[in-house]
């Protein structure tokens, strides 16, 4: 081989290293040129959604999308409208924006779209086998019903006191805001994201996860969580098992975490549990599928890991953004304080303890702050499904975006094998829908001039009980309620 290269180099009148250097530049260049030519010169099937141009084959738009997804969506929308396809690491991903786009994806029929086929490569190595996206959708629906048993009003009533307790302890503790707390007016900077991550894990473990998890927090559990979390990285969507140290650590942590939860379950079963336990482990033990089979210990352990991962990032990011937004608008801090005084004030300048029913029904300003935070900063920017059979999209869905070139009557087809992506965060800041869309203004939720997303008559049960089937809303930080 090397002789042939040398011969070729001699023929061309260059040295071997020179030839190799030329090849190193020329081959990728040729690949890029071919990729560009294919997009520019080859006719595109007019029934396919418009294609986002990208230079590099395979990689596609991975870099622009990955660096700033909202900027990427906005640029593509300006050029192509609400429906377009981009290339992402060898895949075709069709983005459907706007309320109708979200509806298409969240309410897609099971024979058309699959969540498990889009997510399992990322989630199963982290959560473990036999749960969530490692099982058919019908089994996930049953597993969510089991979880719902734990998310009861009775449990929530207990959680409010536990959460108060943890947060107060954190504020007084050494790590937390102790300096701030002591003199009440310190202006020392606080790493708010770090603080919210700690508060989230403290409260989640004290309530949903259970006393054994809370007690283990200071020990090895935090390291396990950290290693497991390291498995949640975008590349694992596409290639989940590269022989990387992070993946070895993920797999080791998954096994140890799974063993840890199974140990808790076995111990509780042996000791008969504790009637004071209002956590999810207690709720999941002894539940059965419709066919009579009991939820296994492994399934319980892996559901607990899945809930840990589902709740931790979403809640800590939302809490951090809320604090940052409030810091920029102190008038709302004052409004929140006045609201607390008016519902919890004891008349003597003190406050009685928080309780679930008041939190649920009588703190509209706090509610509005949370809603507004989730409008501007929904923790999940891209929601994906794999397309199982061709989806026909009415042209009306694709056309309303800026200057779509295809506003005629023809429909688009999203072919089987593509992925579809919803991004509700885009319509949550759409200036055509929201007044001063970029401004943090909780008042817009307090009946002061904003249109509330339409309620739809039809209801459907995705496992949490009957809810509105309408995913046809510009505000969907939690997806379609599933
Ligand atoms: C601010 C907090 C949260 C936000 C914004 C949020 C958002 C979302 C979104 C957008 C989805 C849909 C994903 C998809 O359809 O592909 C989802 C799914 C899910 N979330 Fe959350 N989440 C939050 C907190 C939590 C918590 C605390 C838990 C559990 C303790 C949880 C459990 C789940 C589960 C189990 C699913 C999967 C449901 C399914 O596939 O049917 N989430 N979440
Ligand atoms: C992506 O779509 C193109 C048509 O635009 C098709 O030729 C190609 O095979 C698709 N790739 C995958 C991985 O589905």
Image: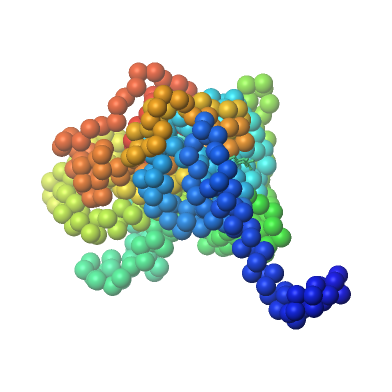
* Residue at image location 15% in from the left, 43% down from the top: 342
Q: Which of the pair 445/12 is nearer the observer?
A: 12
Q: In the figure, is residue 246 to the left or right of 17?
A: left
Q: Quadrant of the N terminus?
A: bottom right
Residue occupying the far top of the picture: 458
Coordinates of residue 398 in the picture (x, y in percent): 41, 33
Q: Quadrant of residue 111?
A: top right
Above or below residue 11? Residue 425 is: above
Q: Which of the pair 198/246 is nearer the observer?
A: 246
> Does residue 361 show up?
yes
Q: Quadrant of residue 221?
A: bottom right
Above or below residue 466? Residue 105 is: below
> Does residue 107 show up?
no
Above or below residue 164? Residue 463 is: above
Coordinates of residue 424 in the picture (x, y in percent): 39, 40
For the image shown, how many numbered marks are present on the structure? 0
Residue occupying the far bottom of the picture: 15
* Residue at image location 42% in from the left, 51% down from the top: 72
Q: Which of the pair 355/436 is nearer the observer?
A: 436
């Amino acid at each position: 081989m090397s002789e042939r290269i040398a011969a070729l180099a001699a023929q061309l009148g260059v040295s071997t290293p020179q030839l190799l250097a030329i090849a190193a530049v020329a081959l990728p260049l040729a690949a890029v040129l071919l990729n560009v030519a294919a997009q520019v010169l080859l006719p595109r099937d007019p029934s396919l959604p418009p294609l986002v141009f990208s230079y590099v084959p395979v990689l596609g738009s991975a870099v622009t999308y990955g660096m700033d997804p909202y900027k990427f969506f906005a640029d593509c929308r300006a050029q192509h409208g609400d429906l377009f396809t981009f290339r992402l690491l060898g895949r075709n991903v069709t983005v459907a924006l706007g309320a109708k786009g979200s509806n298409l994806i969240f309410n897609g029929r099971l024979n058309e779209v699959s969540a498990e086929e889009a997510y399992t490569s990322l989630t199963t190595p982290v959560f473990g086998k036999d749960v969530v996206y490692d099982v058919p959708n019908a089994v996930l629906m049953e597993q969510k019903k089991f979880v719902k048993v734990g998310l009861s009003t009775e449990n929530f009533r207990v959680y409010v006191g536990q959460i108060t307790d943890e947060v107060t302890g954190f504020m007084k503790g050494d790590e937390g805001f102790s300096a701030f707390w002591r003199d009440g007016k310190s202006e020392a900077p606080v790493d708010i994201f770090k603080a919210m991550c700690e508060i989230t894990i403290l409260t989640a473990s004290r309530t949903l996860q259970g006393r054994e998890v809370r007690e283990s927090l200071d020990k090895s559990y935090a390291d396990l969580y950290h290693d497991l979390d390291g498995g949640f990285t975008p590349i694992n969507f596409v290639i989940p098992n590269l022989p990387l140290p992070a993946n070895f650590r993920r797999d080791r942590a998954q096994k140890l975490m799974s063993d840890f939860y199974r140990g808790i379950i076995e111990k509780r079963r042996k000791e008969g549990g504790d009637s004071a336990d209002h956590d999810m482990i207690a709720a999941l033990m002894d539940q059965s599928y419709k066919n009579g089979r009991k939820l296994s210990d492994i399934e319980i352990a892996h559901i607990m890991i899945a809930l840990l991962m589902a709740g931790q990032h979403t809640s800590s990011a939302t809490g951090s953004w809320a604090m940052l937004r409030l810091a920029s608008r102190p008038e709302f801090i004052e409004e929140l304080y006045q609201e607390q005084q008016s519902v919890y004030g004891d008349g003597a300048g003190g406050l009685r303890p928080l309780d679930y029913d008041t939190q649920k029904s009588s703190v509209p300003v706090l509610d509005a702050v949370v809603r507004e935070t989730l409008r501007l900063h929904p923790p999940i920017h891209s929601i994906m499904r794999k397309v199982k059979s061709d989806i026909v999209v009415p042209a009306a869905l694709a056309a309303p975006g800026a200057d779509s070139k295809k506003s005629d009557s023809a429909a688009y087809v999203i072919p089987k094998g593509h992925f579809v992506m919803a991004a509700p965060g885009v319509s949550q800041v759409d200036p055509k829908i929201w007044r001063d869309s970029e401004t943090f203004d909780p008042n817009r939720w307090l009946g002061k001039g904003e249109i509330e997303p339409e309620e739809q008559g039809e209801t459907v049960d995705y496992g949490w009980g009957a809810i509105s089937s309408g995913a046809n809303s510009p505000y969907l930080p939690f997806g379609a309620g599933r």
